[in-house]
Amino acid sequence: MQLYSYWARTTLDCQNVAGHWFHLIAYTGSDESVVAAQAAGQQLLQERHSRLLHDEPLHDYPSGTAPLREQLEQRIVTEHGELIAALTRNRYGSLVLNAPRVMFLDVDSHDLLEPPRPARQQPGTPFSWLGFLRNLFAPAPPPPPPAPAPPQPDALAQLEMRLAAWLQLHPEWNFRLYRTRLGFRLLVTHQLLGPGSAEAQQVFAAMRTDAIYVRLCQSQNCYRARLTPKPWRIGWQRPAHPFPYDTAEQVQQQRQWEQEYARRSQDFSVCELVGEYGSGTVTPEARQLTELHDAACLGGRKLA
């Protein structure tokens, strides 16, 4: 997981080789202190300024390797002190569980109901002017009667069919299935599995996991599960200031926002348990995170 305990925002006003002014901003993190994060930001800005002076393009991070700029709320460790997860607050204020090896999958209903793409047509016969003119002036044949559309199973049935097919090939696997506001969440409990592994890629594809979610898991080297509602679904707005906060006043405003957000969240749940599918095997790490996840997300209230 690319998470930091401390973050800082640093700025630099400077000129490029042509004398044009730039306002540079860097967000940098550290597990040591805010001062260390600020020092890293100043160094990064100096490097960017040097690139401007050499007429080189600015790049914040190599593609897909930027650390996740979120406020770290808690590190989750086992009874032996091993780090297995972390709680962060995302950009719109929800608490998120980040787990590097306990696999969560985010599946949207519309992805499950999307029909398969038609196969690409094979090249036909060479173009013929005679055939073109014959077809152009020939009377159009009556259209054939539309074929009745086959009944389509709902999203849950589609996902359960995919789970059954996967478990037929991999009977040792075990899934917990949850329904969310717009789809489903799967929790893999029988083994620990990194998001960059070949097995993870296979199950991502087999369950039609949301593509944006997959890319985020791979870039951050961890899975993510939102534990609290999205604020606009509970009649509340996003936080007024992005993290990290620049002033003590912004910190105070954020604390007030969190208090009201927590009060409004009490009437909502994030997901509901549909069932468990597979071998029933649960690793100690998965059991610990399942208990934390279910305590935060379930409750039988309106999903948000």
Image (cartoon, helix red, strand yellow):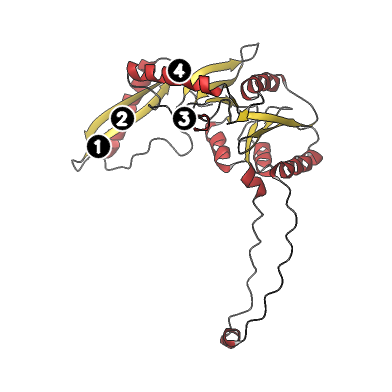
- Looking at the image, tell me whether mark 3 or mark 1 is earlier in sequence order: 1
- Secondary element type, mark 3: loop
Residue type beneath disc 4: Asp
158, 57: nearer the viewer: 158
- Nearer the camera: disc 3 or disc 1: 3
* Residue 105 percent across, percent down from the top left: 64, 35
Q: Report which residue position mark 4 lands on.
A: 31
Q: Residue furthest left?
A: 19
Instruction: Tell whether 151 sits left or right of 69.
Output: right
In the rendered image of this protein, does residue 109 appear above or below residue 47? below
- Secondary element type, mark 1: strand
**Circles 4 and 2 in contact, beta carbons < 8 Å:** no
- Looking at the image, tell me whether mark 3 or mark 2 is earlier in sequence order: 2
Q: What's the CA distance linking mark 3 and mark 4?
A: 23 Å
Q: Report which residue position mark 3 lands on.
A: 92
Q: Report which residue position mark 2 lands on.
A: 45
Mark 4 Cα within 10 Å, few/some/many (few <14, many 20+)?
few
